[in-house]
Image (cartoon, rainbow, N blue to C red):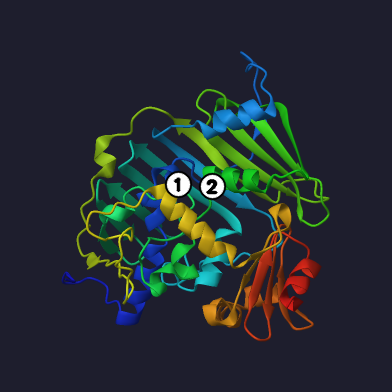
Amino acid sequence: MNHRNVGAPIITGAAKQRRNRAWLRWVPAVAAPAVIAAGVLVGSIPARAGDALADKTPAEVIALLAGNRTHTFSGTIEQVSELGLPELPATGPGSGPASDDPAASAIEMLTGEHTARVFMDGKAKVRLQVVDRFAERNVIRRDDDVWFYSSRDNSTTHLTLPAHARDLPLEDPALPGASPDSTSPENTMVPPTPQELAAKFLAAADTTTAVSVGPEVQVAGRAAYNLLLEPRTSGTLVGMIAIAVDGETGMPLSVEVTARGGGEPAFRTGFTSLSLDAPDPALFNFVPPPGSTVEELQIRHPAHPPVGPGSPGYPGTHTEPDQLEAGIKDKAGSYLTGTGWETVVGLPADAGAGAKLSTALAQNPLLAQAVAVVPGGRLLSSALFNVLLTDDGRVFAGMVPADRLHAASSAP
């Protein structure tokens, strides 16, 4: 049931639908504590004088990172991107800091600077505050209740987590069993976290990758190992990745990505302050402010869900997180070509991604300026990734040179 208070801003049905789809993007983040446990990152700096960390091999640092179990902390995190893309600024409270358009929202997240505050106390108490230029967005989880609040229009959305979504695997891009509408790209664009990025980059680190440990670094006042990944292939735009791994807990503190041939990181994200003390319990309580609209967010299920034994929701059946993760990876595999650093994601025209990207380009002149017309389509280029939109509506993307995308689009 919808509740509207007297004097609350009027939000049209279409606007509500767009806002609710946007909020769904955050559900995996608050449902999986590991996602919040690292946040968005900032570049590392040389360690200050003090007790040096014990020497570790790359394998030992990776094992330390994999063993991270930090679920109680608070901190401020920052992300800085210098990808060569135009920054899409918010012009004021009316325009909103985060675009309703999914493609434009993704570009916004990958340009300029972004700041957030993260609070976590155990696996079921999480608060994320994203600070935009003219507004603040809050995501608060306490047990099964998740609240989303935006000061831009004083709007509140509430979600009760279903049993199958209370402990999603880190890589899960959407709620299992959700409708096609709620698993579309616009609903799954959760900002990357250190733990997510570290896991993805390490997964791409095959025999073509040189792995080493650089000089100790200091991030948010904490000594960290500097794990370095260097692709030894010309088939990627990535030159070097530096992951700062907390020397005490193994928590990823920062990630830097430098483009091939680049001198400075093109993408930096990490903690600027961090405390491992338990946050104030009051931070996880939320009451809608006076005049706020309150919407109940529903998680819709497929019209014909599987009903056989072993299927999620079947009586007596419990689906483990690793089973969900395996299913997601199997489904994603059909859209991938290449391996490791040379992986290309290809989406068919009927997936709708091409239409959404075309709409974003038409509505954002700054974004359109970054696109070049190429044989067979249009190319959005950056220092670390390329996106090819073909004339027939397909989309190909990857951290690879443009010719790799053209080759993938021409493959039978």
Q: Is residue 327 above or below residue 201?
A: below
Mark 2 crowd level (few <14, some 14–19, many ≥20, 10 Å Cα): some
For the question of whether residue 92 can be seen, the reply is no
- Residue 263 is situated, as x and y percent measured from the top left of the image, at 80, 46
| Residue closest to the eye, 11 or 375 | 375
Query: Left or right of 121: which side holds 402?
Result: right
Residue 339, placed above or below residue 198: below
Give the label on residue 196, or none: 2
Disc number for residue 344: none
Residue 284 in percent (x, y) is at 27, 43
| Amino acid bearing label 1 | Val
Query: Which residue sits furthest top?
Result: 51
**In the image, what residue occupies the spot 78% across and 67% down?**
404
Name the quadrant of the N terminus: bottom left
Please, what secondary structure does the residue beneath circle 2 have? helix
**Viewer-closest of 195 and 293:** 195
Q: Residue at x 65, y 29 (%)?
A: 59
Which residue does the image show at 70% across and 56% down from the upper left? Answer: 339
Q: Nearer the viewer, residue 276 or 411?
A: 411
Circle 1 sits on which residue? 35
Tell me the kind of residue under disc 2. Glu
Find numbered disc 1 in the image and state the secondary structure of the residue it sits on: helix
